[in-house]
Image (tube, helix red, strand yellow):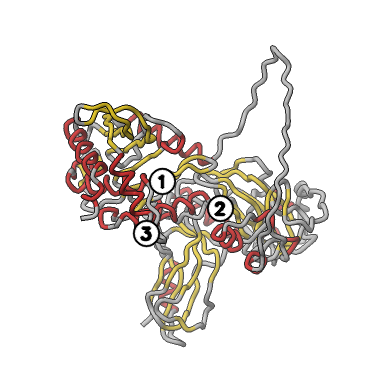
Amino acid sequence: MATIINMPRLSDTMEEGVVAKWLVSVGDKVEEGDILAEIETDKATMEFESFYEGTLLHIGIQEGETSPVDVLLAVIGEEGEDISAILNGSASAEPAKAETTEEVKEEVAIEASTSVEIPDGVQVISMPRLSDTMTDGTVATWLKKVGESVEEGDMLAEIETDKATMEFESFYEGTILYIGVQEGETAPVDSLLTIIGPAGTDVSAIVANGGTAPVAADKTAAATPEKKEAKPAPAAKVEEVKPASTSNTSNGRVFASPLAKKIAADKGFNLADISGSGENGRIIKKDVENFTPAAKVEASTTATTVVAAGVENSTETKNSQMRKAIAKSLGNSKFTAPDFSLNIEVDMDNAMASRKTINAIPDTKVSFNDMVVKACAMALLKHPQVNTSWTDANTVYHSHIHVGVAVAVDDGLLVPVIKHTDTLSLTQIGAGVRDLAGKARNKKLAPTEMQGSTFTVSNLGMFGIQNFNSIINQPNSAILSVGAIVQKPVVKDGQIVVGNTMNLTLTCDHRTVDGAVGAQFLQTLKTFIENPVTMLA
């Protein structure tokens, strides 16, 4: 019996997805566990696995197409099985999340009766929705120009979303006929981004119509001898094509495939040192695998900028999509949650000795931050009131403990999440934090790796900051700010001695966490950190 597979919800906030690539074709045999397709969600392209076996009978969403979740993606069944009833049923059904207002229905009906198909081979590409919260995108860099040839898999542009600047891949081949959003410009999702098709194709009517097919002449008028000649639309602007460079860099950017970038990051290679053998000098997988780093001497130059005394000068930098998202999220948190902060000083002498002993074990590396994260997870077990979320109707108590760890990236801040932190050892937490932090800095975090935190840790100690207050990462009820370890005189057993201390600040949402509860949590946390052996039991 045929099985209907809908567009999956690959994250709890995902509303639609883009089929980046089909890995199977209609008629192919599919086994349980086979990868069916690569689907673009808000922050990553994820592999979608089949949970059924049989023959792929139908593909409902083509490569490059965007669709809401729960819309027919594919049908798997027995070879030769009749699925016409399924297809007819799905065709008449409205997608669950599609717009259903009478105005939209009427507009679609009119368009269907009066429009003609876009010329063969021409693909109209819209601004993609690369994030579940993305409403518009900024073209940071065009990697192709009008008149240049494009192959399937080529990177067209770098598009700045609310979370990251992401490469946008072409799912078609042809020639760039038109670019609708210039570098540095911001445009809404689904607006005309570019048009690809056979060289020389006239797309001026499509451009004039906002990226949709031109309207055909009225059928009754076409049947009469007299025929009015339509006024031609303005021709699409064609940019001058410059010869492609054979270097793998342009304006300081290194051209490399995503896989090559990942391998280079894993090996610690600088892509700028690697020669590319791909198209236009693009670095591909084999270039990285065959690369042998050589010692090099870096020359240092000092540039001096002379500014005239008394001259006032200001420059404006356009806000990135990530900065806009951070501003919105933290603004909502700060202005809706009545927060308060509690401070405590922790003796780090035992923690420093324990860390030294642990890291003496081969292939083991634990940081002080890993110890704090583990201590937080154990303290949350003892103080479940802190492991909560506020809603207008209820306080949600989480039985699971997922600790988010704030990571600074070039454009802002990301918070990857260590799931079920209380069940992990110090070394497991350390490995998990390093892996997720590396992905965050390389913009490779999957959506699921940044969702579901119940508590957050933010550490600025490596910058020498001793005290600071963080803004709560909602829907968490609290966030811990971790300062630097400092050496100073302390009193022990009535004597003044040299000690190592660290300041912790707990910022709480007063709607869920009262002052006494926060203070008790900090006392428990202090006990765990000052006595690391208690975290190993």
Q: Quadrant of residue 339?
A: top left
| Mark toward the start of the polypeptide (3 vs 1) | 3
Residue bearing the label numbered 2: 128
| Mark toward the start of the polypeptide (2 vs 3) | 2
Across and down, in percent, residue 366 comes to: 37, 52
Image-based side of 74 in relation to 216, left or right: left
Q: Is residue 195 visible?
A: no
Residue type (three-letter) at the residue carrying disc 2: Pro
Classify mark 2: helix, strand or loop.
Answer: loop
Mark 3 or 1: in front is: 3
Mark 1 or 2: in front is: 1
Q: Is residue 343 above or below residue 528?
A: above
Quadrant containing the N terminus is: bottom left
What's the CA distance linking mark 3 and mark 1? 29 Å
Classify mark 1: helix, strand or loop.
Answer: loop
Residue bearing the label numbered 3: 361
Mark 2 or 3: in front is: 3
Classify mark 3: helix, strand or loop.
Answer: loop
Residue type (three-letter) at the residue carrying disc 1: Val
Q: Residue at x 30, y 44 (%)?
A: 351
Give whichever of 65, 427 is nearer the camera. Answer: 427
Q: Is residue 395 visible?
A: yes
Q: Residue at x 41, y 67 (%)?
A: 6
Residue bearing the label numbered 1: 415
